[in-house]
Image (cartoon, grey):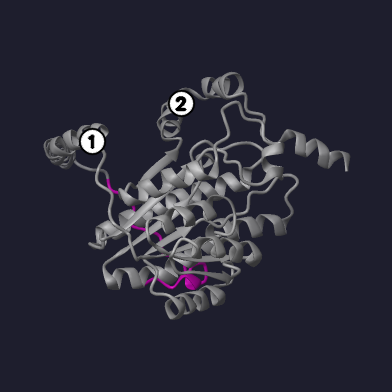
Amino acid sequence: MQNIHDIGREPYVPAEPIKNRTFLECFCFVFVLFVDIIKVVLLSIPHFFNALYQVVVKPAKKSVFGQTVLVTGGGNGIGKEIAIQFAAKGCNIAIADMDVTAAEQTVMQLNKMNVVARAYHVDITSTEQIKKLKIDIEKDMAPVDILINNAAIVPLLSLREDTGDDVERIINVNITAQIHVTRAFLPGMIKRKRGHIVGIASLSAVHPTGGAVIYSATKGAMQNFIVALNEELRQEGNDCIKCTSILPFMAATRKDIIDAAHVRFPIISPTYVARVAVNAILRNQLMVSVPRSYLWMIQWMNLLPFPIQMLVRDIVMKEKGMKLLSEDNKRK
């Protein structure tokens, strides 16, 4: 393993100069590449028909009854609703949140559903508190089977309004902490050959918005983290560990966010997000947006030239970011 701290300190050793390929080498490369493409096409045929079949007949959901689910930031909003959905499936729930009062209130509601639920007051930006959280959950309940990386800061600040501390806190909570939480619980999942890592990203990961520049950047990082982790596990032969990235549209969570938002399309409920998210997890889907159709619409839009994309944003989506908030801040 490379020592990261030595990078920049040790002498820089340049790579060997790239040599021009001969005609024969180029021909061989193209020929082998063509053969591999044909192989992929042939091997893809059954997967293609299976995908068509799943459009009509949804894949069966896996059973998670009795499993332990950890939801970071599960005291309120989407995290709380995901916890309720999993409790309805017979899962035991651990809620980790800075807002311990909200976490305890959620746990009281979950305990009425005949499952074991515990609240943990944790600042997930602290690696020591993450380690203690893992020990406490395994002592109080059981090893975590499903990790929901949900905790996030949704700031109402433009890039120019953010202070250095604001930027650092948003990045630490929204992505750095989620990586450390995953690193804490993943080895146990691999050892037990069972587990599911979930990242609650956002549609802003693939459709970044003004007025939430740092937030969009962290959600893009979360999206890529989950997909890259899934690929790493697959390449290592640890594909018994599943990964899912959830990309919700704006959900009715905090009142101040909704009051400051300018969106044309209907704001969705946290319950709806949770229902779609849990169904995607139970079907081992790698990535899903909420609503489901929004992701492919954005992907198609991103194929258009940038000036046309801007027209779609201005005329069809009528995006205005968080301008009112910025104006209020200027008046202050």
Other residues around mark 1 within 10 Å, as few (<14) / some (14–19) / many (≥20): few
Query: In the image, residue 85 lies at what x, y percent?
Result: 44, 52
Query: In the image, residue 207 lies at what x, y percent?
Result: 52, 36
Q: Quadrant of residue 48?
A: top left
Residue pictured at 63% horizontal, 55% vertical: 170
Query: In the picture provided, is 261 more to the left or to the right than 21?
Result: right
Front residue of this view, candidates 280 and 298: 280
Circle 1: residue type: Val
Query: In the image, residue 155 lies at what x, y percent?
Result: 67, 48
Specify which label sits upstream in the sequence, 1 or 2.
1
Is residue 318 among the parts visible in the rendering? yes
For the image, the number of numbered tags is 2
Query: In the picture provided, is 178 more to the left or to the right than 160?
Result: left
Q: Distance between the residues labelled 1 and 2?
A: 28 Å
Residue pictured at 54% horizontal, 45% vertical: 270
Residue beneath disc 1:
57
Q: In this view, does 293 lie above or below 20?
A: above
Other residues around mark 2 within 10 Å, as few (<14) / some (14–19) / many (≥20): some
Is residue 12 among the parts visible in the rendering? no
Residue beneath disc 2:
301
Residue pictured at 18% horizontal, 37% vertical: 50
Q: Give, as a single range, the part of the protein colored magenta.
A: 1-19
Front residue of this view, candidates 138 and 5: 138
Q: In which quarter of the image is the N terminus?
A: bottom left
Residue 259 is inside the magenta segment: no
